[in-house]
Image (cartoon, coloured by chain):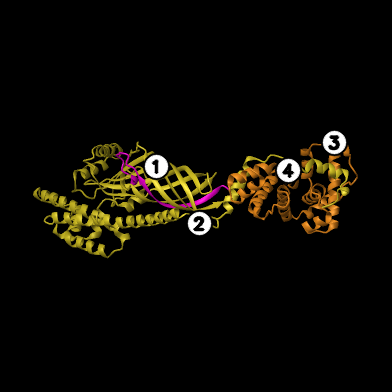
Chain colours: A orange, B yellow
Amino acid sequence: MTEENLIKACLKNNRKAQKILYTKYAPKMMGICLRYASDKEKAHDYLQDGFVQVFLFLHTFEHKGSFEGWMRKIFVNTALAKLRKNDPLRETKELDKVDLTDGNASALSQLSAKELIALVQALPDGFRTIFNLYAIEGYSHKEIAELLQISEGTSRSQYQRARGVLKKKVQELYER
Amino acid sequence: MRDRKDIDAFDALFRSKLKDFEEKPSLDDWSAVEHRLSKGKLLPFYKTSVFYRVAAVVAFLMCLSVFFVLERERPNQMVEVVPKILDDRLLLKDVEPSIEEPLAKVRIVRAQMPNTADKGLSRLAVNKKKAVQASSLQKVNKEASSKAETPKTEDSKEKDFVLQKGNLAPIHKTVRYTTKHRKAKRGDTWKIGIGGGSTSTSSALTERTSLASDPIMNVQKVGLMYTSRIQDPTVSERENIHHHRPLSIGLSVSRRFTQRWRFESGIVYSFLLSEWDLKDSPETVEQRLHFIGLPLALSYKMAEWDRFICYTSVGGRIDFNINGKQTYRLAEVQEEREASFSIDSRMKNVLFSFNGKLGLSYPIGKVFSLYSEMGIAYCLKNNSEVETYYLKHPFMLDFNIGLRIGL
């Protein structure tokens, strides 16, 4: 079954087609959710919320871009909507004294994806969100500012702090 | 989006490792998504197929009609009591003419009373019948005693006065204790010692009086007396039988297999209480039966309003009688004392029943839901000698309220 036919079947509320679509994309979407969530339990919540949104708004997909790209946006927006409720920018004070010196790049390359995910998850919500959007998703600070309704300066400073924390933790992990 | 040249080595490394990172979700995630998708879509009643709409309306009307039929049946059963008593009165006319007037009053008052008073009145009438019988026997005894030229005691004088006056209240008072007293005394297993009162009635009462004089032997003797009555049905002919509606409490588990259909099962505890009198003897019997039922049903979701779900179901149930007891009581109201004896009356055969229900459920959290059901049930005969509400009213109206665990 082609992706287009699968989407059509999903639009008819065919449960089997929906499950096939879910099985196909769930691992990738889970990866996104794990990056935005502070723990695995929340990641599962984001995943479920994201797929419910995907099936509810599937009729808005216009078949112009990639379906996976469209789904990623849905999942990122779902995670952001959840994070907005917590007002992530409040959680920056405790990390004001972060050392922003560059870490060892070779140390980073030796860490596994799961270890990196764990490091990202350990960041405060605001740092983690902006780091994800800027460093991994490729959003500009202007786009992030609009998306999160904060100033560009706040986005920049949060990103720099997030980097600093991550570099320090990568170094610590490498030295063990 | 930014240009690629803006991304430094640190970000690039994170990006390369995490951008397409995948992890297998848990099995529960799809179930949760599926559950939420089906919950999100409301199923209005008008979108249900015509067949199910008609079936739902018919089921609802049947439930209502059964309810009204059952409600009407009750006063009719009570009406049968009075003509019977009036027949008895005619038979005893020669023996006790003075009793006619209050009986006539009973009939008139009964006609003016609302249905709710029927039960009490019928019992009053039955008590009156017993009083009439007692008075006839007393008259025979009186004649015998006058032949023997023995002087009357204070008690017997008072008794004569009561019967000749035909006063309802004293007559009611001299008869053994009623349902009201039975309820008040419930929970007391043994109470030994029976007062004098009527000294001029049947041999059973004479035996009872003699038992009262020896409290230690009372239990054994009363027990033997009742056992003999139970074993011989001709001796213990029942009358004034009242089966209370069963009380049930249960835990239901359901498993959805399509958007509208689901299986239901669970466990139900039922308590059945029955009461009756033994004809021409002073005992009253209370039967308590405890059942554990295993239901199995197929349920169809007809419609949703907000979070309420309207459904209909058909199924069956197997009930096992785990415990049963018949308590025989003997007492005199005047003395406020009684004697009782219990025997095991567990029903060995299982009870099979079929039912159709119309229900409404409301979810509490993700797993639990409160439900209320109304329906009709039919209980198959199981050739048991133990008489219950189920077997006496095989076609009955069923109301259920409970908590359901949805899987």
| Circle 4: element type | helix
Identify the amino acid type marked 2. Lys
Whether residue B92 is visible here, answered yes or no, is: no
Seen as rendered, the residue at the extreme top is A176
| Residue pointed to by mark 3 | A174
* Amino acid type at mark 3: Tyr
**Disc 1 element:** strand
Q: Which residue is mark 1?
A: B290
How packed is label 2: few (under 14 Cα within 10 Å), some, or many (20 or more)? few
- Viewer-nearest of discs 4 and 2: 2
Magenta-span inclusion, residue A80: no
Q: Which mark is residue A176?
A: none
Q: Are marks 1 and 2 in contact (CB under 8 Å)?
A: no
| Disc 2 element | helix
Q: Is residue A28 left or right of residue B122?
A: right
Q: Are marks 4 and 1 in contact (CB under 8 Å)?
A: no
The answer to whether marks 3 and 2 sit on the same chain is no
Marks 3 and 4, Cα distance to the nearest angstrom? 23 Å
Is B296 rendered above or below residue B112?
Answer: above
Q: CA distance from mark 4 to mark 2?
A: 40 Å
x then y, percent, for residue B57: 42, 57
Magenta span covers which residues? B365-390
Residue B365 locus on image (x, y percent): 58, 50
